[in-house]
Image (cartoon, rainbow, N blue to C red):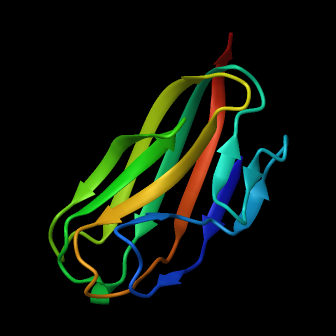
Amino acid sequence: FKAWSDGRSYTNPPETVTVIYENVEFNPDCAYDPTTGIWTCPTAGAWMFVSTMHLSDNFGTPNRLMYFNVKGVNYLTAYGASSSEKTLEGARAFNLEVGDKVKVNLYYSTYSAPFTGDGNFFFGFRLRTE
């Protein structure tokens, strides 16, 4: 699957936000839900996920962490701690069972500014079946 977002704003969001990629380019099993940002595993096996997030200039200088949330557990994928680090990128593989859920979470340590994304994407593909 492949989903992307050309920009999304969150004003005074909670510290952790599930990132929504509302534009779906490829979704053969209808496993990605663009209204919730959650991908549900259609076939057991090893899966690779990749995500990139571009943050706006007015995002400030909080700590920013991007996680893949798999089965309710956060796995750190990318870290940025300065205002010059505007892009978070990460890739990670997981062994999944049918029905397991994966989403991208963004955490930041301040409520000081909204952020917008430009050119964000989230995609995944199966490496092997069980």
Q: Nearer the viewer, residue 103 or 78?
A: 103
Q: Is residue 103 above or below residue 91?
A: below
Residue occupying the point 37% across, 75% down: 55
Task: Say which quarter of the image contains residue 79.
Answer: bottom left
Q: Nearer the viewer, residue 2 or 98?
A: 98
Residue occupying the point 46% across, 45% down: 68
Name the residue at the top extreme. Answer: 130
> Quick check: 69 left or right of 47?
left
Residue 85: x percent and y percent?
22, 69
Q: Quadrant of the C terminus?
A: top right
Residue 84: x percent and y percent?
18, 75
Residue 22: x percent and y percent?
69, 69
Q: Is residue 58 above or below residue 87?
A: below
Residue occupying the point 38% across, 85% down: 12
> Quick check: 15 left or right of 17?
left
Task: Say which quarter of the image contains residue 89.
Answer: bottom left
Q: Is residue 81 above or below residue 48?
A: below
Residue 10: x percent and y percent?
47, 82
Total count of labels? 0
> Quick check: 107 left or right of 29?
left
